[in-house]
Amino acid sequence: SDLSNNPPNAMPQKKSKGTLNRQVSGEDEDLSALGVPLDAVVKIWCVHSIPNFSLPWQRRRQERSTGSGFCIDAERRVLITNAHCVEWHAQVKAQRRGSDVKHLAKVLSVGWECDAAVLTVENDEFWEGLQQVKLSQKLPHLEEDVLCVGFPIG
């Protein structure tokens, strides 16, 4: 759907074929109705330090960025995010939805071809009650409705 006509602070809308758009509010009961465990979504905080290829013994200035990730296996403590979110990472932290605490994360693997990175957090407190997303085996068809979640909204 085209959100370009919506004001910058507008909440996203979920579209379903043959139904009217429904405004998505911040209420937990409304969010759970979407069928996605939004408590599985985490915010990824990253400090990057791009190498200086001309002077390899020096590093360039550190930069900070944020991205979205989500838990795909709470038992094995696996988070997934985009590879570009952790490119040239010096430090990575993960923050749960509704929490102010940022937990130190470790990058386990990066797949540049598919822009995916696998992370983990060693702190037991981070994983307490964290929901996980069940990935579908089915790929959406062209022009099929999909739901995207992430920070800052979800």
Image: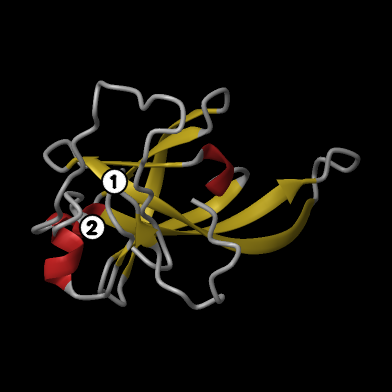
Q: Nearer the viewer, residue 35 or 117?
A: 35
Residue 18 has which mark? 1
Tell me which residue sits at (20%, 54%) in the image: 34
**What element does badge 1 sit on?**
loop
Query: The residue under label 2 is which amino acid type?
Result: Leu
Residue 135, quarter of the rendered image: top left
Specify whether 80 is left or right of 132: right
Whichever of callouts 2 and 1 sits on the residue coming sooner in the sequence is: 1
Q: Is residue 125 visible?
A: no
Distance between mark 2 and mark 1 Cα atoms:
25 Å
- Considering only vertical position in the picture, is 146 above or below 45? above
- The quadrant in which the C terminus is found is bottom left
Tell me which residue sits at (29%, 46%) in the image: 18
Crowd class of label 1 (few under 14; some 14 to 19; many from 20; radius 10 Å) = few
Tell me which residue sits at (20%, 50%) in the image: 36
Q: Position of residue 58 (x, y in %)?
A: 80, 50
Tell me which residue sits at (37%, 61%) in the image: 13
> In this rendering, which labeled residue sits more in front, label 2 or label 1?
1
Q: Is residue 88 visible?
A: yes
Q: Position of residue 100 (x, y in %)?
A: 31, 77
Residue 127, quarter of the rendered image: bottom left
Callout 2 touching callout 1 (CB < 8 Å): no
Specify whether 88 is left or right of 95: right
Farthest residue, direction right: 54
Q: Position of residue 99 (x, y in %)?
A: 26, 74
Q: Which residue is mark 2?
A: 38
Farthest residue, direction front: 18
Q: Nearer the viewer, residue 105 or 57?
A: 105
Crowd class of label 2 (few under 14; some 14 to 19; many from 20; radius 10 Å) = many
Query: The residue under label 1 is which amino acid type?
Result: Gly
